[in-house]
Amino acid sequence: MNSLHSTIKDFVKKQENVIITDKRYRLSYHLMPPVGWLNDPNGLCQFQEDYHIFFQYSPFDAEGGLKLWGHFKSSDFIHWDYMGAPLLPDEAYDCHGVYSGSAYCEDGKLHVFYTGNVKYTGDFDYILEGRGSAVIQAEYDSSNGMFSNKSLVLENKDYPEDLSCHVRDPKVYKEDGSYYMALGARSKSDVGEALLWKSDDLKNWSLFRRITSRHKFGFMWECPDIFSIDSHKILSISPQGVEKSGIRFWNVYQSGWFLLSKESEDCGSQSISGDFHEWDYGFDFYAPQTFQDEKGRRILIGWMGMPDAEEYYQNPTVELGWQHALTLPRELSFKNGVVCQMPVKEMTALRQQKVVFESTLEIVPLFELQIENPSGESFSICAGGMEFIYDKIKGRAVLQFSGTEGCGRDMRMADVSDIFALSLYVDSSSAEWFLNHGEFVFTTRFYPLTEKIKLEVNGQKILHSLWMLSGFEFGHGSQFF
Ligand code: FRU
């Protein structure tokens, strides 16, 4: 480890001594930064039985800044240890940020592949010139909880010439005995795409295929991920620059998936013609990543936030010294032609007492509500300034804020012909609404003004079950939470 490494490590430790004393809006069963800023989930994996969740972390400023990786570990998704910041910007090729990446575990080793971000000094636009975006590999050393043996895998000169400097977010996986790495990219002519690289040894990589959409779909594709569920091959991306269209794409940036067809895979380059399906219809969801656990489940975790949204809506936690969180881990399945997401079943361990109520009650925002709608009627649910309205006649679901709890968040919609079930998970300042066992999801932050919020379920034939939930349990490092 070089001296820059020790200096940054000391700075992080010092910063993490700044304990957040005002716990307002701190979440109970979602992962948050100990202090400062969090964005993308990184390096998701199950390694030697434990689940590892790394994340983009900027402890020095609740509004972002120099990025490191922070680290959480758990054996059951309920008991968590905060493990510190194991990957730091301490080399010339990553000195302006250890950006997003993924993990690959094999032969008792946890490898990570991430983006080393460098901004050269000069009069540059940092799109076409002035930025270094390298792929770097490192290995996890469980004896000290740090990543070591960093090595440069790819750098800008290795990428196709028609690309801008924006090439990042390696996602590594194995298929039919070969290793693949997906990278997100922006072309010089402002078209988003994914690059697919292939390797036999995880060290030497050659460009295998470029994946684009038949018609331009945004200027940059961030955080690509390729995986299969029940033999359906999925490409997940977080595109930037997609225009608002009807009730779709109202967020600053999007994230969703395409189906990759076998036929187009056989050609050298792949252009996608199918629909783009949004992962989430709420205000706060971006840059998800998936991994397969030892039980064979494909699990997705997203960043419960939205970049560059400050002019539209805010998070009052900034004044309290922190910002953003991760979504619940969601198990993916493929049903009726779409990828569905539901919280992993481990979350049922958070259930405490069941609460019986007619249609209204005052409640601490720490609960799970399950709704069944056997007659398929219109209904609405109000919770702490959030209003969820399902209009059967219009075939539309709306999530909107009636008061100030949304801090600028207004309304999001999805066309849903039938809602027969809804699961709502409310934490102190977050809500995840899963429709039809995860066919549609709305994720949002909200900021209640009082300790208890009003919950109201309106619908003649609606059946509901409500549980109070406990929080995650934190071990080592728990003073932060
Ligand atoms: C997505 C993203 C990634 C990048 C990281 C930097 O939110 O912009 O493309 O690697 O965040 O923090």
Image: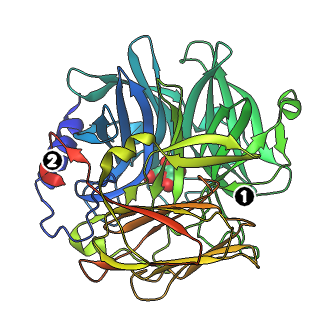
Q: Residue at x 40, y 87 (%)?
A: 404
Quadrant where the N terminus is found in the figure: top left
Q: Which tag is nearer the camera, tag 1 or tag 2? A: 2
- Disc 2 residue type (three-letter): Ser
Query: In this rendering, would 263 be left or right of 242?
Result: right
Q: Quick one: label 1 or label 2, which is nearer the N terminus?
A: 1
Q: Name the residue under label 2.
A: 478
Occupied quadrant, residue 83: top left
Q: Nearer the viewer, residue 123 or 225?
A: 225
The reply to whether residue 138 is in sight is no
Q: Residues within 10 Å of mark 2 (few under 14, many from 20)?
A: few
335 relative to 323, above or below: above
User: Where's residue 82, x and y in %?
Assistant: 23, 42
- In space, the residues marked 1 and 2 are separated at their CA atoms by 44 Å
Q: State how the image is colored.
A: rainbow
- Badge 1 marks a residue whose secondary structure is loop
Q: Which residue is drawn at 53% across and 39% down?
A: 290
Q: Name the residue under label 1.
A: 190
Q: Does the residue labelled 2 lie within 8 Å of ligand 1?
A: no
- Badge 2 marks a residue whose secondary structure is helix
- Disc 1 residue type (three-letter): Asp
Q: Which residue is drawn at 25% across and 64% down?
A: 26
